[in-house]
Image (cartoon, rainbow, N blue to C red):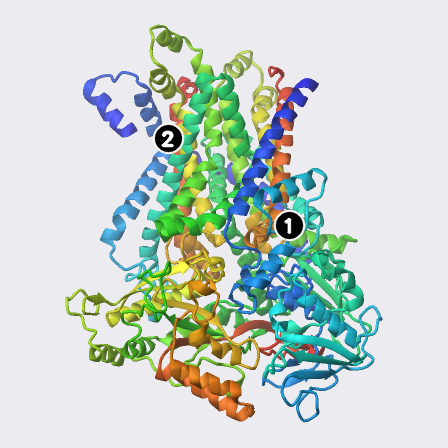
Amino acid sequence: MSLKRLKMQLVRLGLLLIPLFMVGGLLVHHWVPAQAQADDTLRLLYWQAPTLLNPHLSTGTKDFEASRLVYEPLASFDAEGEMVPFLAAEIPSIENGGVAEDLSAVTWKLKSGVTWADGEPFTAEDVVFTYEYISNPEVGAITSEYYADIASVEALDPSTVKVTFKEPTVAWFVPFVGTNGMIIPKHVFETYNGPNSREAPANLAPIGTGPYITEDVKPGDVIVYVANENFREEGKPFFKRVELKGGGDATSAARAVLQTGDADYAWNTQVEAAVLAQLEAAGIGRVVAKPGPNMERIVINFSDPNVEKDGQRSHKDVPHPFLTDLNVRKALSLAMDRQTIADQIYGVAGTPTNDYVLSPENIRANAPWEFNLEEAAKLLDEAGWVDSNNNGIRDKDGVEMRMVFQTSVNPVRQKTQEIIKQDLGKIGIDLELRSIDASIFFDSEPNNPDNLGHFYADLQMYTTGNDNPDPTGYMRRYLCEEIAQKENNWANANDSRYCNPTYDAMFAELVRMMDPEERDEQVKKMNNFLTVEDVAVIPLIDRTSPAAAANSLDGIDLTPWDLEPWNIKDWTRKS
Amino acid sequence: MTRYLINRLLISIPTLLAISVVVFAILALAPGDPMAEFATNPAITAEVRENIRRSLGLDQPIYIRYVKWLWAFVRGDMGFSFNSRSPVVNLILQRLPTTLWVVGTAYLLAALLAVPLGVISALKRYTFFDQVVTTLAFVGFSLPTFFTGILFIIIFSVQLRWFPFIYNSTLRVTNWATFMAQVRQSIMPVMVLVLFQAAVLMRFVRASMLEQMNRDYVRTARAKGLRNFVVVNRHILRNALIPVVTLVALDIPTVFTGALVTEQIFRVPGIGALLVDSIYRGDTPVVMAITFIYAILIVIFNLVADILYGILDPRVQYTR
Amino acid sequence: MSASSSTLSQTTAPERPPRTLWGDAWRRFRRDKLALFGAATLIIIVLACVVGPLVYTASHRQIDFSRAQIPPSWAHPFGTNDLGQDVLARVLRGGRVSLSVGITSMLVAITVGTLIGAISGFYGGWLDVALMRFTDLFLSLPQLPVLLMVIFLFRETLRRLAGPETGIFLLMVLVIGSLNWMSVARLVRASFLSVREMDFVLAAQAIGAPAHRLIWIHIFPNVLSPVIVAATLSVGTAIITESTLSFLGLGFPPDTPTWGRLLFDARDYLEQAPHMAFFPGLMIFLTVLSINFVGDGLRDALDPQMRLR
């Protein structure tokens, strides 16, 4: 090709490019920076898009979150575990007579003069109706389990409602409180309290008592809220308009808040530490951690997953060949490099822990832990687990220390698995890693051998925690009677098949205790028994749920026991 | 002609039925259910699950659900979404304009760009121009769209700050400023799609041109002493574009299903994003409706393509 | 294939090779510089992925946070990723998976397509009608959604049957292959329809050649060229499809490196560690590019119309 022709071609290409640049220039010329948008509009970004605005029919946390701007519970818990009234006039207690002496009932006084967004008055009848709606099996409410202990809910007068329990309970504050306690209006849902519950128009056009009402709802995309003119608090909320945009992925959501300022607040930015730190360096936003009770743990199988008995593996009567040995479990706990996992993989979203119960703070035991491979190796040597056949893997009586370690598919979990595999390999324990799709791993189908209830592996890793400040239900998980087996369709919570009469006895004491401080001490004692003395479970990470917020946003106060917009009426923008 | 049309439409009915059976069966046989996210939640007991399944009508046998679905669809009722509990029709109608705007614009631009480029690069085969265009085309379809999308965000949103990367579907175009805002927020998703579509189409146009250029009739035309322009314009182009036109017609239904990946990246609330979400969440009614409408569109546009073929190419006769 | 036939023609007739289809094709292919470049690149990439991990012995899984996100250096020619794993080792490993997905699913598509097209075109009649309806059915399925759906819904079943990697590999190859055979089937059928009526086939039929001989010996070689071109192109498509599935979280298990997965994992680090994305991206690009060049070259080389030039 001659030089002249080449030149001609270049000129022609250039001619093609000129209009492109002109168009580009025109567009850039009209560019309005995102910051110049109205200050009284709050832009929320949820990478999972809400699809439904009825908390009791939610299909995910996202729906609860989006509903919380509109609906309110009677009360909620703040980050310190203190109760905060919403629709209740005061917090019931034994002293003020709200809670019955024998813990069999609780009487709530409601705020007077509260109206629904459409002007109808809010009364005790609405609370009663909410209970009827949730407990109606034909409705299929997602929250119904939280109301299962209730015997009756009755309106004593328009501003007093009495909840009677089937049995006395310390957890009288579960119904109508926090995430699962949002009250819905009787006059709107009355005709949809049945199989037609999903046809209610109010599922997408909610009428609540909260600070906002919806203006435009596009399920799976965006929800536009405007301030509720009938909201009881004068001058609140600060933001006249809230746009909740959904979809995309966590990283770009964090990017929009921290780096480009396209949004003010992004929910649940579970992004790798290094990435988040780099985005935060732009200086226009910050990462706020939502503290929580959720703990990433390694669950130990005390039964043998490789022996079949009575049509099931992991039978409680077939003990595991080496995980039943306390020294082995102690060695495993010592071989967990919690600090590296927390720093390198979780970043702001996690800190190392060895506690079974994390929240509230006053019942946290802060159990000790260390990462010490030599000590772990020594314990194994002492227990008789040595590499007698020189294949690099410890053994004893012909049993090799090989384990299957399963968890759900999730990049963070797979990386954690890799780190643990490497460290255990150094002390002569071989791990086979398995990752199972989350929808399979976490399901509860009796015929799915891959879920965590069946636990057909030696170790498994996942996150859970207590869902209210009272950990009693959560402590039940390690009782003998809670062992997950075929007989109960693997639906019981003790997937570990752990059974220790000492622990059962401690739990029995806990249930009998009424004094709060005594209870707290007992929980701590049980905590240390589970994680240090008997190593029934290996806690790894105290997981927080990070959110990204613009620096101009004030008033954010996240609590483990309620949704992130729980105090959105107090959010303001610094000028 | 009319008989031919009727024949074709009648033949397509069993095909459509077969498709609906296949898709329904795939969905129904799958493990997991719409409640996947709550699986770890100990409060969602087996009983609660059963209640939810019943309220969604999932407790009935598969064949009954299928017959019910089909009968409702024929009457124009696509049912309720499991996730938003709102009618599927509303969800689709809500998202259709966005999809048509973004994906449709992209397709149009791609066609406008690809045809001339393809023609020129075929005529100037093996020249510098051809090689540049060809290489660009290869870049276009050898980079996955998720990657070009993220690259664009980093370059144009983060570094240059030219365009926003969150698609705002509440924007109403009322004046010049809002129109420009609409254009600006659409540029990146559209460009990602254009890059890919134009590349594919351009290669096709080029190949089709090359095929015609060596035909006997072209040589005859040239031998007659016709000017190059006339040969290209009247003879080659007309014949070469026939398969291109039909290909474009056959591709139009894909505009409806949207762009799964691109919509996800730029948060464009289109049909594609709806479809992906619905697949993940086991929202059978939505998946069924979208795939089935797509199948119907395919059948219709197949017919359109055939008719176009007949109009453009007089040699084609409609028989049967 | 073309290389061996050329040596063959040289040994039999050193002075003036007889003009065979393959000989001609090879000569024309040789003159096409882009196609030659493509073929060379492709061979290098395939060799690197097959032999590379044996020569370059750095571990592709060894995690070491002390050396995370290092740019390319002598110790790590392609740098390291966010976990401190060696990117070159992962690219080579990933290439094995990506290339085998591409090639195997191409084979599935070509086999199914050719079989259906050949039977349909050769026998005609009701069989033709039925098979073409079947082809239409597959054409009216929305490709990516169906692909997504099938993989999303059935990967766990296959994983259980065949293990995490093999299971997803089988599923992916089968699904990508079985959604791509339709155009091949149509091409083959069309060619069969026209070739079937040609004199040499009629002659072979007249002397009593059985059907399978007619199909495979007499007709099939004549429809080979569109099939080869379609085959090369579908390898590229399959590699891209695999990476898109990885993006949507439905690809191989997260710890199995494939080019698509590597590119996907690098997406968050584009600013800090662009090399993490650059190398896998380059490999996908080069592979698809060279496959297409080869495909183009083959089409030109095999097309009888082109011979006139």
Q: Which residue is the site of mark 2?
A: C32
Quadrant of the rendered image containing residue B41: bottom right
Quadrant of the rendered image containing residue A479: bottom left
Do pointers 2 and 1 mark residues of a single chain? no
User: Which dot, 2 or 1, sits closer to the camera?
Assistant: 1
Residue under the point 48% across and 65% down: A491
Is B162 or A493 nearer to us in this picture? Answer: A493
Chain ID for label 2?
C
Residue B302's spot in the image, x, y percent? 61, 29
How much space separates mark 2 and mark 1, taking CA atoms?
44 Å
Residue B291's spot in the image, x, y percent? 60, 42
Question: SS class of the residue under badge 1?
Answer: loop
Q: Which residue is the site of mark 1?
A: B270
Callout 1 environment at 10 Å: few (<14), some (14 to 19), or many (20+)?
many
Instruction: Tell which residue pokes out farthest to the left in this image.
Output: A389
Image: B26 above or below A537: above
Image: A160 above or below A215: below
Chain ID for label 1?
B
Is B29 or A284 nearer to us in this picture? Answer: B29
Residue type, label 1: Gly
Callout 2 environment at 10 Å: few (<14), some (14 to 19), or many (20+)?
many
* Quadrant of image for the N terminus of chain B: top right
Is A349 or A424 nearer to us in this picture? Answer: A424
Residue B206's spot in the image, x, y percent? 51, 30
Q: Is residue A262 visible?
A: no
